């Protein structure tokens, strides 16, 4: 399996999106009093993943 830089950035974006989803779900189900904070951080992870995905063909 050859990993070029586009695949590595794609996998990094996927991992960031999964981590963002996990943070949002942790905030909703485990710590409901801190849901806003966890959601903001999770959305931030989504934004970084989106930027990585947008840059995937350009780096």
Image (spheres, rainbow, N blue to C red):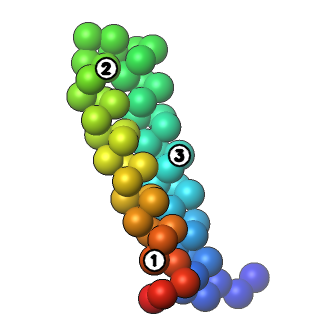
Question: Horizontal and vertical percent for residue 32?
Answer: 33, 11
**Mark 2 or mark 1: which is in front?**
1
**Mark 3 or mark 1: which is in front?**
1
Q: Quadrant of residue 35?
A: top left
Residue 18: assigned label: 3
Q: Quadrant of residue 50?
A: bottom left
Quadrant of the rendering where the C terminus is positioned: bottom left
Height in image: 43 above or below 33? below
**Image-based side of 45 in relation to 58, left or right:** left
Residue holding disc 2: 35
CA–CA distance in space, label 3 to label 1: 19 Å
Height in image: 1 above or below 48? below
**Image-based side of 22 in relation to 47, left or right:** right
- Who comes first in sequence, dot 2 or dot 3? 3
Determine crowd level at label 2: few under 14, some 14-19, many 20+ residues with C-alpha closer than 10 A. Answer: some
Q: Nearer the viewer, residue 33 or 46?
A: 46
Question: Horizontal and vertical percent for residue 38?
Answer: 31, 30
- Who comes first in sequence, dot 3 or dot 1? 3
The residue depicted at 37 percent of the width and 39 percent of the height is 42
């Amino acid at each position: 399996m050859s990993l070029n830089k586009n695949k590595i950035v794609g996998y990094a974006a996927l991992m960031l999106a999964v981590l963002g989803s996990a943070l949002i779900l942790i905030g909703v189900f485990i710590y409901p009093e801190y849901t806003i904070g966890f959601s903001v951080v999770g959305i931030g992870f989504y934004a970084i993943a989106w930027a990585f995905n947008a840059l995937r063909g350009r780096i």
